[in-house]
Image (cartoon, rainbow, N blue to C red):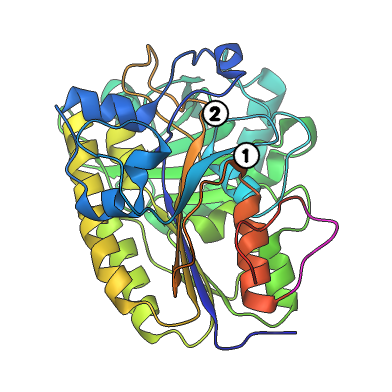
Amino acid sequence: MSLPTRRAFVVVLDACGVGELPDSADYGDAGASTLPHVAEAVDGLTLPNLGELGLGNVTEILGVPAAAAPVVHGRLHPMGPGKDSTTGHWELMGAITPRPLPTYPDGFPEDVLAALRSATGHEFCCNKPYSGTEVIDDYGEHHLKTGELILYTSADSVLQIAAHDRVLDEPALHAVCAAAREVMTGEHAVGRVIARPFTGEPGAFTRTTGRKDFSVDPPSRTYLDELHDAGVPVHAVGKVYDLFAGHGIDEAHKGKTNEQALAATTELIRSLETGLVFTNLVETDQLYGHRHDTAGFAEALKEIDDAVGAWRSLLRPGDLLVLTADHGVDPLSAHTDHTREHVPLLAVTEPQPDAHRHDGPMSDVGATVHLWLTGAEVPDRPGTSFLQA
């Protein structure tokens, strides 16, 4: 039985992990704990709204004391391998990747390069794991002189292509990456092909907001598909639409920056009649996490905290707000890639039931949202609701 007056909002604080997993050492991430280590680096976080909900009850975070009356709170873990945004968001919606997505620590092999050249009509330079900001500094001038596109990867399952807007405008770069996505299939089915446009002059290159992710299809149906097929409207904010390759999503809303994503989410909380809003807040990962910029990370968290306070005032009876993450990016790590961690869970309902702690798999988020919005369970999807329907 559908519950047409109910709404749910799932907001992913990208890369805001809360502690290592039992197998973190296998990924080179022993001891990882993103939010506690960011807090230590800035002598404590100031997050009154998240703190009131119980973020300090999830794990110890300097500056965020445990709340006397927290909402539903806890730590969630992935059931499958990996530590990237693609698999993290899939897990939240009940799709578990059966095997690690391919990575390329030595760059892409010659057969892949040949296929990319043939499919795109372009030559490439770099072809190795690289920081996204450093790669344009180191290869940008060469790229401008030769026209070779900057091809690089990371510890995650990604193929990234950077191009200056004088060499390729954003639509042309997006078309190149769409062609590359068609190449990267089978054993080379990377999680994402990412367009990375940039601008400026040598010594002062900057990335633009024209990034676009071309994700591989999820490995199974997700709770987004189930909701869509049940007639529940599904709205995606930020890169969520790209991460699911559009599957199960009715409408996509801009969110290339946190400012855009927070504004879009706020407007949907104000105006949406029924359905799910699934938001990604990218800057804690993209702008600050990978650069180990703890001051910027803390400031982004404060802006999110302010928005959470506003959202709570807009919730209606029958609403559910879930705050979580997809992985970590610990600033104390020796590398600048994602870290394999637990993610936080804070779940606010209107009215709010008795608080309890819930630790479980990330797919419990999707299971909870589906039951909340439809009143029905999906027997063949992983996850169990942490709330009553």
For residue 171, above or below residue 285: below
Residue appearing at x 70%, y 54% in the figure: 384
Report if the CB atoms under discs 2 and 1 are less than 8 Å apart: yes
Secondary structure predominantly adopted by residues drawn in magenta: loop
Residue appearing at x 37%, y 24% in the figure: 330
> Which label number is shown at residue 156?
2
Does any portion of residue 336 appear in the rendered image?
yes
Q: Amino acid at mark 1?
A: Gly
Q: Residue beneath label 1, please?
A: 191
> Which label number is shown at residue 137?
none
State the residue in front, 365 or 140: 365
Does any portion of residue 291 appear in the rendered image?
no
Query: Does the magenta portion include 380?
Result: yes
Total of numbered circles in the picture? Answer: 2
Q: Which residues are magenta?
A: 376-381
Residue appearing at x 57%, y 48% in the figure: 89
Q: Amino acid at mark 2?
A: Asp
Where is residue 186 drawn, in percent x and y? 79, 36
Q: Earlier in the sequence, mark 2 or mark 1?
A: 2
Estimate how packed mark 2 is, as few (under 14), some (14 to 19) or many (20 or more) residues with alpha carbons within 10 Å.
many
Estimate how packed mark 1 is, as few (under 14), some (14 to 19) or many (20 or more) residues with alpha carbons within 10 Å.
many
Q: Look at the image and tell me in which quarter the N terminus lies.
A: bottom right
State the residue in front, 134 or 236: 236
Between the residue at mark 2 and the residue at mark 1, the CA separation in whole angstroms equals 8 Å
